[in-house]
Image (spheres, rainbow, N blue to C red):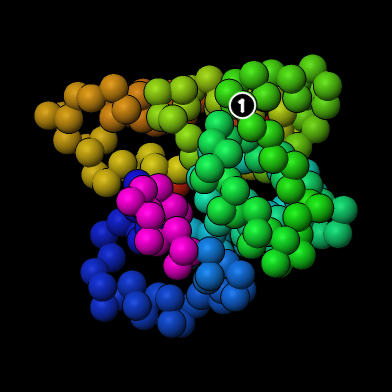
């Protein structure tokens, strides 16, 4: 729900980007194009993308999952962080939005690393469990419909190997998760998964205020 990290004022955000962000021209162009859409707030922050790319490289990921593509910025940033022969299986239901990203994937020369699956993510992930097997992936990023986060989490946890990472986006939800007066279904679902992860002894976790809040989950 945010193209910038929660809690940063404009001056500090500009400093963070100026001092840290290394953004490939295709990423910048895709981010600017997406910024003109009515739904632009669905795009991740560029500093979040760079952080995810570092994670992917740090764990030596070769096979990754993405649940929720939108216009494909996060897909592109992860694909560019993979070694030759790496693969992103990217799940989304929108041909319209994902078509925006396709030309930038091609422009950056990583289209062969991206396996876009159009259809309900639950079905796609269930199929991967059957065909690829548990533990077949190194990294997963979940940024889709919030009411199904718990389902996506359980499926991705099965698909990711021991020592692999699952990243969950929007866990702070513009601060609404901390406001007891906010009782809509999406906010309640995010509170629920946050509480579940806190006590889940199958994983190590860290919630960090990057973007709209990220929880990093390491499978034990």
Q: Compared with residue 202, is residue 37 higher up or lower down, i.e. above or below?
A: below
**The image quarter in which residue 217 lies:** top right
Residue at left offset 76%, top offset 65% = 109
Q: Compared with residue 123, is residue 56 higher up or lower down, i.e. above or below?
A: below
Q: Which residues are magenta?
A: 31-46
Asked whether, in this view, residue 213 is left or right of residue 119, the answer is left
Q: Compared with residue 160, is residue 130 higher up or lower down, i.e. above or below?
A: above
Q: Is residue 40 magenta?
A: yes
Asked whether, in this view, residue 24 is left or right of residue 97, the answer is right
Q: Is residue 159 magenta?
A: no
Along the viewing direction, whichever of 132 and 42 lies nearer the viewer: 42
Can residue 185 be seen from the camera position used here? Answer: yes
Residue at left offset 38%, top offset 55% = 37
- The number of numbered badges drawn on the structure is 1
* Residue at disc 1, secondary structure: loop
Along the viewing direction, whichever of 179 and 14 lies nearer the viewer: 14
Residue 39: give x, y in percent of width and height.
36, 48
Outermost left residue = 181
Can residue 201 be seen from the camera position used here? Answer: no
Residue at left offset 39%, top offset 42% = 170
Along the viewing direction, whichever of 4 and 205 lies nearer the viewer: 4
Q: Compared with residue 210, is residue 46 higher up or lower down, i.e. above or below?
A: below
Residue 17: give x, y in percent of width and height.
43, 76
Asked whether, in this view, residue 166 is left or right of residue 33, the answer is right
Residue at left offset 52%, top offset 71% = 28
- The residue identified by callout 1 is 119
Q: Dot 1, crowdedness within 10 Å: few (<14), some or many (≥20)?
A: few
Is the C terminus in the top left, top right, bottom left or bottom right quadrant?
top right
Asked whether, in this view, residue 163 is left or right of residue 18, the answer is right
**The image quarter in which residue 153 lies:** top right
């Amino acid at each position: 729900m945010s193209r910038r990290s929660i809690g940063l004022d404009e001056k500090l955000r500009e400093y963070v980007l100026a001092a840290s962000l290394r953004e490939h021209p295709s990423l910048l162009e895709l981010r600017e194009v997406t910024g003109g859409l009515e739904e632009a707030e669905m795009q991740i922050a560029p500093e979040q993308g760079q952080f995810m790319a570092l994670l992917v490289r740090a764990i030596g990921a070769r096979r990754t999952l993405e649940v929720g593509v939108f216009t494909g910025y996060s897909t592109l940033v992860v694909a560019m962080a993979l070694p030759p022969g790496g693969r992103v299986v990217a799940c989304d239901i929108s041909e319209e939005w994902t078509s925006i990203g396709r030309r930038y994937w091609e422009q950056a020369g990583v289209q062969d690393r991206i396996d876009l699956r159009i259809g309900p993510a639950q079905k796609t992930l269930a199929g991967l469990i059957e065909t690829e097997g548990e533990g077949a992936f190194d990294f997963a990023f979940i940024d889709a419909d919030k009411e199904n986060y718990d389902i996506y989490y359980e499926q991705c946890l099965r698909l990711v190997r021991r020592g692999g990472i699952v990243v969950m986006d929007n866990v702070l939800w513009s601060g609404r998760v901390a406001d007891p007066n906010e009782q809509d279904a999406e906010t309640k679902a995010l509170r629920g998964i946050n509480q579940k992860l806190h006590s889940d002894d199958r994983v190590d976790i860290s919630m960090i205020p990057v973007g709209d809040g990220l929880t990093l989950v390491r499978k034990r």
